[in-house]
Amino acid sequence: MLKKIVVRRLITPSEKEERGGRMRIVLRPLFEAELPADFSEVIKGKLMGEEIRTGEEIEVELLGKSLRFKVVLAEPSPLKVGRGTKIEFSQGEVEVVDFEFDESVRDAIPFEKGFVVVLASKVLILNHNGQKIYSDEFEELNGVRVSKGTVVIIHGGSKIRLVKP
């Protein structure tokens, strides 16, 4: 059963400029090289009149070499490159990692070596890549603090555990 139909119409540069909006493309180079300051104008000249969509990979011929780019953002998408289009370059890629736990998260505390996830009765210490460094359960978990790379776990009413990952 069909739930949703999305219809997108290509907006021309003149229509976008008439509306007062800015057309923009953010590209991530798929090659290793230092890009000169005016490189965006060179790329815009090569892409003039082309239809660009967010998420696609494009190739630009320059001095007999093929340069590949990932289109991180085309605003709007799709768009037809014109003289009013702004070209920007991204240096990295945004990585998103989702975690799902069996119980609700009470707190997440960042620190130099990663972050601490506090659940109802459990403390997890994860590095910046999300890999588990430490995990333990407590019958009575009262609180968690971080100080200069040391995680302080307050539990059992009168106990403290220091964890130095």
Image (cartoon, rainbow, N blue to C red):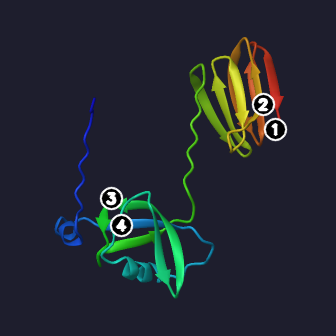
Q: What residue did someone put label 4 on?
A: 24
Task: Give whichever of discs 2 and 4 has the lower sequence position.
Answer: 4
Q: Disc 4 versus disc 1: distance between alpha carbons?
A: 44 Å
Q: Amino acid at mark 1?
A: Pro
Q: Residue at x 80, y 22 (%)?
A: 160
Q: Quick one: which residue is furthest to the front in this view?
A: 1
Residue type, numbered disc 4: Arg
Residue denoted by label 1: 165
Q: Position of residue 82 (x, y in %)?
A: 29, 75
The image shows residue 32 at horizontal and vertical percentages of: 63, 73
Dot 3 corresponds to which residue?
77
Using the image as rendered, state which of residue 93 and residue 149 is in the foreground. Answer: 93
Q: For the residues labelled 1 and 2, say whether their Cβ atoms are less than 8 Å apart.
A: yes
Label 3 amino acid? Ser
- Quadrant that contains the C terminus: top right
Q: Given this view, does label 3 or label 1 mark the residue nearer the observer? A: 3
Q: Disc 1 or 2, which lies upstream in sequence?
A: 2
Q: Which residue is mark 2?
A: 134
Q: Give coordinates of residue 76: x percent, y percent.
A: 31, 60
Image point (40%, 72%), residue name = 87
Circle 2: element type = strand
In whole angstroms, how far apart are the C-alphas of marks 2 and 3? 44 Å
Q: Which mark is residue 52?
A: none
Examine the rendered structure and indicate whether residue 46 appears above or below residue 69. below
Whether residue 162 sits left or right of residue 37 in the image: it is right
Q: Residue 130, how many percent across, how many down?
A: 68, 39
Horizontal arrangement in the rendering, residue 16 relative to residue 89 (left or right): left
